[in-house]
Image (tube, grey):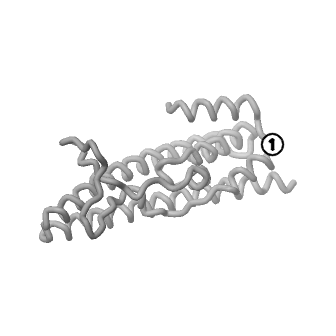
Amino acid sequence: MRTGFRRYAAHMKAETPSLSTLHAELASLRVLPCRLVHERVIVDANGIQRRDGAVEDDPGMVRVGLCSKALRDKQLSCAHTRARIVLDTAIVQSAARGLLPAQEAARLRAELQRIDHAIHMTDWDKNQAEVRYALLLEQGRQDALKDEQQRLNELVARHGQLSAELAHIHGLMLERLGKHTEE
């Protein structure tokens, strides 16, 4: 379990939020497929931008970089967010309060964990594919660029599919919590 998750989970356990607070926090989150653009290698007229101190195993390529922390904190489909912890907490709290059957909560949590892992793996795979693409570009290997671009497109599509699955869970939990905060 990640340290950040443990801290947040302990906080949420110690301070059981009201349903309206939990619903508002969940409603503030978004699912926007970002194409994992932060992994893109910066290539300009001078070629691939590199950091100083590149080593053999790390070509030291400069990336577009992460979105702001404020944006990541609200972005469920980001590979570098803690927002999915809020969604997990909403599932756990809904089950604990009897708003969600335990079996459904367990299924949703397992699905969320699967999606979380798949987003991280897709992010890693895109990182590697972007490096390969940039190196092929640098080497003038036009013959291989098309295949690597296809791989990048597949990874972006995979992230889009995972985002759609997250949006479904997010929408379901908003609906469930919404019904009980209006009462």
Q: Residues within 10 Å of mark 1 (few under 14, many from 20)?
A: few
The residue nearer to you, when weighing 16 against 30, is 30
Residue kind at label 1, given as amino acid type: Ser
Image position, residue 158 (x, y; %): 39, 60
Image position, residue 10 (x, y; %): 66, 29
Tell me the element at label 1: loop
Identify the residue shown where x is 74% and y is 51%. 23
Identify the residue shown where x is 51% and y is 43%. 110
Image position, residue 115 (x, y; %): 47, 50
Identify the residue shown where x is 54% and y is 63%. 32
Task: Answer with left or right where residue 33 lies relative to residue 52.
Answer: right
Tell me the quarter of the picture where residue 176 sits: bottom right
Q: Is residue 125 above or below residue 160?
A: above
Task: Answer with left or right where residue 97 lies relative to residue 102.
Answer: right
Task: Answer with left or right where residue 138 lies relative to residue 52.
Answer: left
Q: Quadrant of the C terminus?
A: bottom right
Tell me the quarter of the picture where residue 161 sits: bottom left
The residue nearer to you, when weighing 63 against 89, is 63
The residue nearer to you, when weighing 76 against 46, is 46
Which residue matches tag 1?
Answer: 18
